[in-house]
């Protein structure tokens, strides 16, 4: 009788398949927020609109304000943050990491082949295309927090 009862019971619950934590709705919100910061001055070590941004400071500010999570502060650590994403699977809100080893720059993918980043001293946060002459020559990878 006990054996028959065991066969008729429901199968044990399986652990859910892990999914990337960044939903597409949250990714869109992150992208929109990042685009709203275009024009903010670049400042090495900067991490607020008032003080200016460097590339990792921009990412940290946007992600913390829109998701409540603070990503690592350096590009080297961002290069391993979250899950790797194939270029064909990238979506808004994913991180764009430049440089193979070491990583040297990062931005936020906002869709249609574009990303927002804080590129250099004397510049401002800007929206660029991944296929422009300079960026298309760089090693690039994507991460989904």
Image (cartoon, grey):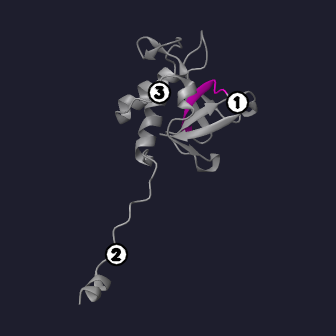
In the rendered image of this protein, does residue 80 appear above or below residue 16?
above
Q: Secondary structure at mark 3?
A: loop
The residue that mark 2 highlights is 11
The disc at residue 135 is 1
On whether residue 26 falls in the magenta region, the answer is no
Q: Residue at x 52, y 39 (%)?
A: 94
x then y, percent, for residue 34: 47, 29
In the rendered image of this protein, does residue 131 appear above or below residue 91?
above
Image: magenta residue range: 102-110
Q: Residue at x 43, y 28 (%)?
A: 62
Q: Nearer the viewer, residue 86 or 76?
A: 76
Q: Real-space Cα distance between discs 2 and 3?
A: 41 Å
Q: Pointer 2: residues within 10 angstroms few (<14), some, or many (20+)? A: few
The residue that mark 3 highlights is 72
In the rendered image of this protein, does residue 54 appear above or below residue 131?
above
On whether residue 104 falls in the magenta region, the answer is yes
- N-terminal label among 2 and 3: 2
In the rendered image of this protein, does residue 84 appear above or below residue 18?
above
Q: Residue at x 66, y 26 (%)?
A: 102
x then y, percent, for residue 100: 69, 32
Q: Residue at x 43, y 11 (%)?
A: 51
> How would you classify the magenta stretch by its main secondary structure?
strand
């Amino acid at each position: 009788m006990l054996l028959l009862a065991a066969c008729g019971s429901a199968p044990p619950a399986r652990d859910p398949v892990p999914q990337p934590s960044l939903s597409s709705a949250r990714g869109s919100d992150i992208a929109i927020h990042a685009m709203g910061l275009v024009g903010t001055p670049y400042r090495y070590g900067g991490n607020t609109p008032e003080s200016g941004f460097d590339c990792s400071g921009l990412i940290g500010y946007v992600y913390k304000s829109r998701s409540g999570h603070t990503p690592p502060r350096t590009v080297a650590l961002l290069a391993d943050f979250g899950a790797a994403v194939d270029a064909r699977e990238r979506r808004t809100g994913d991180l764009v990491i430049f440089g193979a080893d070491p990583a040297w720059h990062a931005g936020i993918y906002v869709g249609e082949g574009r990303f927002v980043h804080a590129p250099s001293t004397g510049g401002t946060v800007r929206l660029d295309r991944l296929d422009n002459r300079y960026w298309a020559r760089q090693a690039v990878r994507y991460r989904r927090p």
